[in-house]
Amino acid sequence: MKKKIAVLPGDGIGPEIIAQAVAVLDAVAEKYGHQFTYEYARIGACAIDSCGDPYPQETHEKCMNCDAILFGSIGDPKYDNDPSAKVRPEQGLLRMRKNLGLYANIRPVKPYDTLLDASPLKNDRVAGSDFIVVRELTGGIYFGEPRGRDESGDKAFDSCVYSKEEIERVSHIAFQYALRRRKKVTLVDKANVLATSRLWRETVKHIHQSCYPQVSLDFMFVDNAAMKMVSNPKDFDVILTENMFGDILSDISGVINGSIGLLPSASFGRDRSLFEPIHGSYPQAAGKDIANPIATILSAAMMLEDAFGLLQEAQAVKDACAKAIADGICTEDIVPGSRYGTVATGQYIIDMIKA
Ligand code: IPM
Ligand code: MN
């Protein structure tokens, strides 16, 4: 199979973890007789530094001209600590999601049995958890208008806006995942307070009744869901939720898994699919060879499976990651004091794939 992949390393640890994921894709290509070519492009702070735009047109065109997109991370403390910055790295990520129509973000969570002690939660709570967060990715308070400051500058506002159509399309994706899993969708919202959440409930109920009666649907307020995710994560199968709640809840899932450095994601929508780790750019670790590459390598596995239909290859990558974790060949986030860094962990995974 021949595929062209847009590779967007981004900022912070992005380039290091992406290098390992690309090396893994090369190993897969070699072993299984595929041809993957890569188009590198800039996004985030590094793009602002070089051309003033966090998502240059050239990057968008490269994404559109490829079969799938592999993305690292963006963000830089020099912008985090400067609220007056007019252009911010995150705008690049948000514009990319919006311009590529990536409205559904899938974040799977399934702790490794060999890693239960890495979670600060009790083993018996965590063992056997297996759920996915389906996060709406191009609407809600991240994008709603109006937003900004009033004339005095002393008041700021963000708008949370959702249309029925935006809710419907991501809901179908959630129900379709549920059909292939334990057939349970939990809609997480704040319908006791927010008008948008009430539209979500109404719309999701309707889709459920008319298209997916064989799936069970329940509703949970987001504050309660945050508590249930750490006290009873096993109760969840598919969590369907809006953009901001999905962002927050999916970081909690890093606690269940033992490290946010293990969690991949896939984004689907109108034009192309994009694969990225759920963690950020971790600038404190940049250049130190300590960042866990597994979340990005597993994102590449999701690309093989979901974008290219290469199930066996994806499984080989997932098995190799599980082996590295079981053998304790991993970065210090899950193996305290580890002598294996980003590169050595990636190399071990590659060796397992080639073996
Ligand atoms: C994520 C990240 C982004 C988000 C940031 C970097 C804008 O936290 O993908 O979860 O909030 O969506
Ligand atoms: Mn996040």
Image (tube, helix red, strand yellow):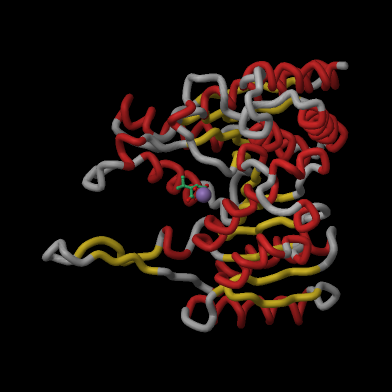
Q: Tell me the quarter of the image containing the N terminus.
A: top right
| 256 sits left or right of 309 in the view | left
Q: Position of residue 123 (x, y in %)?
A: 77, 51
Asked whether the viewer can see residue 320, the reply is yes
Q: Nearer the viewer, residue 40 or 241?
A: 241
Q: Residue at x 66, y 52 (%)?
A: 106
Q: Tell me the quarter of the image containing the C terminus.
A: top right
Query: Does residue 154 lie above or below 322 as drawn?
Result: below
Say how many tags the image has. 0
Please tell me in which quadrant of the rendered image residue 344 appears. Answer: top right
Asked whether the viewer can see residue 176, the reply is no
Q: Residue at x 76, y 58 (%)?
A: 125
Query: Does residue 138 lie above or below 22 as drawn?
Result: below
Q: Nearer the viewer, residue 20 or 322?
A: 322
Q: Which of 56 and 248 is in front in this view?
A: 248
Query: Does residue 129 lie above or below 175 as drawn?
Result: above
Please tell me in which quadrant of the rendered image residue 290 appears. Answer: top right
Q: Where is residue 136 in the image (x, y as percent from the top left)?
A: 57, 60
Q: Where is residue 286 in the image (x, y as percent from the top left)?
A: 47, 25
Q: Where is residue 236 in the image (x, y as percent from the top left)?
A: 74, 64
| 26 sits left or right of 251 in the view | right
Q: Which residue is drawn at 64% across and 29% down?
A: 336
Please tell me in which quadrant of the rendered image residue 324 appears. Answer: top right
Q: Which residue is drawn at 66% across and 23% down?
A: 338
Query: Does residue 278 lie above or below 214 as drawn?
Result: above
